[in-house]
Each structure stands twice: as C-alpha cells, then as structure tokens.
C-alpha cells in the first residue's frame, strides 16, 4: 500500500527564474506532520504548486492549501485592489474594506469537518465579525487567513511562518489550534523557526543553502546557534559610518493621546516621552495598540494632527511635512518588505532610505554608494548588492531594511518585529548588531517584539500597552 501523499525526487525549484533549491528529494507520508526550518518558505510554496519545477519527478498532493502571512484582501469599491502600507490607519479606507463576516462569506467552502459554525469560535473570530479586515492586528489577521483555509477542508495545510509576530499567549493558542487541526485528519507542513516547533510535529527537515541537509524526528533535532562575533574590522567600519546626530530636547512627547475608529477606541489617554539616546521596548499583546502608536510617530496616521504630539521638538501640525518627520526616523518592520517593487535590487532598496521612498525611482547618487557599501559590509550582506530584493531570503531582506533605515543617520530608529522570518542564528546576529551600534552611538530606538529573547541588551526603558492603555512605563 502506498502511504506517500506527496514527493519530490531529484527536483530543482526555481524562484523568479533562478534555481534556489537543487536536486532535492522530499516526501510526506500519511499521518506525518512536518516542520521545515531554514529557508522553508520556498519549499512549501513549491509543494503548493507556486514555484517552477525542473527535472526529477513529482507526486502532487491532493487539495493542498497554502497560508502565508500576507494576502491581497478584496474591497467594496473595486473588489481586488492592493492595500498600501498606511491604509490601515485611514478611516475612509477602512470603510471601503470588507468585514470579517463579509470576507469569509465570499470564500469558497468545501464539504467536510470544518464549517463556519465551528471555525469562528475555535479561532476566536466571533467578536470580530463586523470588524474591517484592514483594522485587524497581526494575530487577528493570521487567524482569519487560517479560518479561510480551514473552510476549504484541505488534506494538506501548508503554513508559512505561522507564529511570526505573535505574542506569547497567541503562540500558545496557535499551537493548541494546530493540535485540533491535525486531530481532525488534516496534515500540516510548517515553515518555521527552529526554536518554535509545535508539539504536534512528527518530522523536521532542515533547508540550508540550495539543499535539504537533513531530516529528523523532533527528539533528534536540536537548534544550535553559531557564534556571530563582531570582528574588529566591523568596529572600524562602524567608526566610518556613524556621524554626529542632530540634538533635540525630546524626540517624542505625547500628552493625553486618544485614537478611535468609529465607536472603537484604540488608544486611551497615552502619555509618553522619548528623549535622545533612550532605548525603549514597546510591549503588549496582539491588538494592544502598538502599531497604531507607532503610526503616530512615523507620520503614517492622520489622527496625529488631532492630538497633542511633539516630534523632534515640533508640535504636530505646526508646518512640518511628513517628509520632514520621516527623514529623522529609520524604520524596519516585519511586513515592510512586501511593499517594495519586485524588480529592484538590494542596493536600490537600501538607497531608497536616503529618500524615504518605497523603492528607488531616481538615478543612484554616487555620493551615497560609499555609505551603502560600508553598511552592507558591516551587516555581512555585501554579496547581495545586485541581487533582486524580492528573491532574497528573509535574513537578507531584514538586514537590507536595517541598512536602509541606518544610511541616513537618523536620531530615532523604530524596529517593529524586525526579525520577522529570520532564523535563530541571524536573530542573534541582528540583536548583537543593535547592541554594538548603540555602544558606539547616541542613537535612540523603539523595539517591538513578542519574543523577549530578541530584545537587545541595551534597552533601558519599557512601555507596555494593554487594550490601548499604558500599564507600564519605566
């Protein structure tokens, strides 16, 4: 009896015309639940039929469904437009977006165990039934995408980094969900960080470079972190890169800030001051209001003008443009990479940081090249200068975005889940880089993460939100 539900034998996988995994063999047997570490996203997209295959033989899975962390939601006015980065903070755009109930009602459903009646309570979506989908938090969006997939009752469910960006409570709840999903007869394959493998997993595959380098049982598998010492040569490069930072009395000063969308209040009476050189952790559960708070600082939210907010010693609405604000802020987020043009190189994406644009739309400036090259060397990504950014793996993308944020020498750095999708080794490297820079620079930053082990050691202040209110400010 053949128990194989999917297999690759000596298959090469291409991404945008480039071979990224070569001559790999991989199979899934009935009853197996797989975790794929390393560059697992490419492999599960190939299993889902989303990548070009060369050579070898393939036994396709029946009814596989892929769930990624991003999607293009439909809206009422054109039923299929792209959402732009700031859209979630604009009330008019929220009015045009579908609600959770409307979105799910438009999804194709397949007969089987999973129905709207049991999916909504299981994924805790009932209270969000009438919420605009672009107002959902990271965790809420992931639950909605999972609900959409379950209603198709797939035989094989492929999940791309499902825990990335979720707080501790949400990660625990998601692991419980996975146990219930697998108990219903659905098999799962997860591209996931090596330190986050759920209990329901029966097999682990490791993807490194262009190959699958090993397969293990969970008991056999252990994540090992390589040392990523920052060399003396990197210290010398950093000395050339760091320039004097403009002086301000306050970088951020908020007094009694309130933000609402319709009848739903997101932030309640927020008082917060950030001074030069301070390093803040911004903490809170999914939906606590962190992204909305950051949008007020980063000139992405028009409601900032209706509140008492000073940025860089100037009151909001006193004549400064959004570009005056953005040029003083370096910004990295977990989902920022998806908003850049898909045909630009890593170098172009980094140079766009000088202009605060989502991509480079002018001729490169020779004077910027030295700074860009030094940052790429310092971050260990100089080999990717001419590589297409959209084809790079998550480790390279996030380091490119960090370089993009730093090239203009800003007084404030905002890091919103900056290690999204990175492997355990590169997360340690990223953390070490931030600590190293702050040892040699008066740079201030705000760091958002649900993983306390990712927080740099140089953090000296914490602001914690709960349901839009400050519950800790130290």
Image (tube, rainbow, N blue to C red):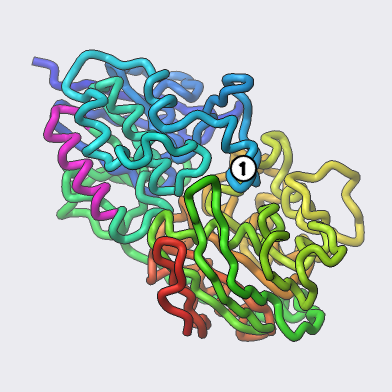
Identify the residue shown where x is 72% and y is 60%. Answer: 305
Identify the residue shown where x is 83% and y is 63%. Answer: 324
Q: Is residue 440 left or right of residue 168?
A: right
Q: Position of residue 294 (x, y in %)?
A: 59, 61
Q: Quadrant of the N terminus?
A: top left
Vertical position of residue 421 compared to residue 279: above or below? above
Between residue 278 and residue 251, name the one nearer to us. Answer: 251
* Residue 454 placement: quadrant: bottom left
The span picked out in magenta is 171-187
Between residue 194 and residue 231, name the one nearer to us. Answer: 194
Q: Position of residue 410 (x, y in %)?
A: 75, 71
Report the residue marked by disc 1: 91
* Residue 177 included in the magenta stretch of the image: yes
Identify the residue shown where x is 62% and y is 36%. Answer: 93
Vertical position of residue 264 compared to residue 52: above or below? below
Q: Secondary structure at mark 1?
A: helix
Q: Is residue 430 left or right of residue 405?
A: left
Between residue 15 and residue 172, name the one nearer to us. Answer: 172
Identify the residue shown where x is 33% and y is 54%. Answer: 194
């Amino acid at each position: 009896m053949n128990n194989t539900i999917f297999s690759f034998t000596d298959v090469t996988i291409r991404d945008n015309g480039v071979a990224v995994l070569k001559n790999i063999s991989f199979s899934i047997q009935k009853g197996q639940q797989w975790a794929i570490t390393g560059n697992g996203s490419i492999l599960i997209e190939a299993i889902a039929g989303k990548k070009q295959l060369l050579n070898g033989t393939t036994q396709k899975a029946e009814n596989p469904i892929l769930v990624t962390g991003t999607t293009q939601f439909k809206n009422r006015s054109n039923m299929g437009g792209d959402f732009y980065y700031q859209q979630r903070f604009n009330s008019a755009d929220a009015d045009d977006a579908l609600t959770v109930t409307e979105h799910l009602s438009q999804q194709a459903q397949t007969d089987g165990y999973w129905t709207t009646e049991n999916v909504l309570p299981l994924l805790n979506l009932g209270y969000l039934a009438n919420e605009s989908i672009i107002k959902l938090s990271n965790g809420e969006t992931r639950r909605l995408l999972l609900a959409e997939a379950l209603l198709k009752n797939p035989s094989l469910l492929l999940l791309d980094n499902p825990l990335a960006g979720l707080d501790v409570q949400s990660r625990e709840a998601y692991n419980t969900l996975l146990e219930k999903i697998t108990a219903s007869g659905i098999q799962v394959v997860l591209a996931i960080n090596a330190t986050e493998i759920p209990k329901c997993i029966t097999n682990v595959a490791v993807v490194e470079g262009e190959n699958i380098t090993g397969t293990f049982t969970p008991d056999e598998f252990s994540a090992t972190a390589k040392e990523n010492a920052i060399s003396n040569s990197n210290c010398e490069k950093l000395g050339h890169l760091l320039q004097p930072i403009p002086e301000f009395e306050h970088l951020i000063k908020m007094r009694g800030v309130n933000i609402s969308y319709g009848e739903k209040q997101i932030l309640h009476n927020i008082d917060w001051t950030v001074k030069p050189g301070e390093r803040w952790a911004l903490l809170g559960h999914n939906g606590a209001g962190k992204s909305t708070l950051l949008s007020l600082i980063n000139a992405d939210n028009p409601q900032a003008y209706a509140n008492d907010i000073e940025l860089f010693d100037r009151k909001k609405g006193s004549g400064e443009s959004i570009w005056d604000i953005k040029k003083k802020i370096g910004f990295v987020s977990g989902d920022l990479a998806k908003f850049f043009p898909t045909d630009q190189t890593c170098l172009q994406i980094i140079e766009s940081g000088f202009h605060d644009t989502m991509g480079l739309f002018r001729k490169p400036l020779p004077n910027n090249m030295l700074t860009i090259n030094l940052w790429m060397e310092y971050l260990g990504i100089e080999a990717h200068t001419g590589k297409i950014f959209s084809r790079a793996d998550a480790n390279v993308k996030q380091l490119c975005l960090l370089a993009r944020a730093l090239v203009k020498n800003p007084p404030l750095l905002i890091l919103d889940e900056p290690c999204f999708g990175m492997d355990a080794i590169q997360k340690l490297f990223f953390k070490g880089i931030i600590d190293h820079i702050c040892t040699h620079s008066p740079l201030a930053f705000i760091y958002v993460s649900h993983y306390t082990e990712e927080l740099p050691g140089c953090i000296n202040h914490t602001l914690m939100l709960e349901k839009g209110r400050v519950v800790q400010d130290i």
